[in-house]
Image (cartoon, grey):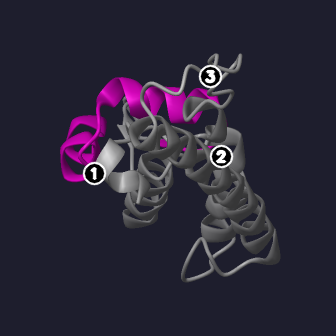
Amino acid sequence: MRIGELAERAATTTRALRYYESRGLLRVGRDASGYRVYSENDYRVVRQIRTLQECGFELEEIRPFVECLQAGNPSGDSCPASAQVYRRKLAEVDELIGQLHGVRNWILARLDEPDAGEPVPSPVCEFSVQGVGVNRGVRMRDLG
């Protein structure tokens, strides 16, 4: 299949596919005319990349999953290096959850005693959702 077909099928852009190729995550064949030609396995690789990106993984964290698929494994999750990345990401998520619980408790305390006259500690919220690789906003109702 050609680049446009793969982009449409994998719900991404041709620009993203070229970027994955430039980063060495996607190995692309060429036909006699020099056009990029993608296989069904390339589709699986791109879907793995997109899924992990949607879950907050950076491209370098995704590399072991791609290498696992390119080695012929049925899933990018099948290799020890992939499991190691999952464990690291899980530790980051657990840390973020702990920080969010702290923020939640601080907010609850402000609600319980709005006029307590206590100075606001500085800094109140010293964490970054983006720093952990989570690319979705946090809604207050999700903190409970």
Q: Which mark is residue 62?
A: none
What is the x, y in percent for residue 118?
Answer: 62, 22
Quadrant location of the C terminus in the rendered image: bottom left
**Which amino acid type corresponds to the residue marked 2 in the rendered image?**
Gln
Of residue 23 and residue 117, the one placed in the foreground of this image is 117
Give the labeled residue for mark 3.
118
Circles 3 and 1: CB atoms closer than 8 Å: no
Q: Is residue 83 magenta?
A: no
> How far is disc 2 from disc 1 in space, using C-alphas?
35 Å
The furthest residue to the front: 116
Q: Which residues are magenta?
A: 1-29
Callout 1: SS: loop
What is the x, y in percent for residue 86?
Answer: 69, 66
Earlier residue among tags 2 and 1: 1
Q: On the picture, is 127 further left or further right than 2?
A: right
Circles 2 and 3: CB atoms closer than 8 Å: no
Of residue 15 and residue 2, the one placed in the foreground of this image is 15
Give the labeled residue for mark 1.
10
Give the labeled residue for mark 2.
99
What is the x, y in percent for residue 112?
Answer: 42, 44
What residue appears at the point 64 percent right and 16 percent down from the top-left corner? Answer: 119
What residue appears at the point 18 percent right and 44 percent down from the top-left corner? Answer: 8
What is the x, y in percent for residue 96?
Answer: 64, 49
Q: Quadrant of residue 24?
A: top right
Q: On the picture, is 131 further left or further right than 80?
A: left
Callout 3: SS: loop
What residue appears at the point 38 percent right and 58 percent down from the top-left corner? Answer: 43
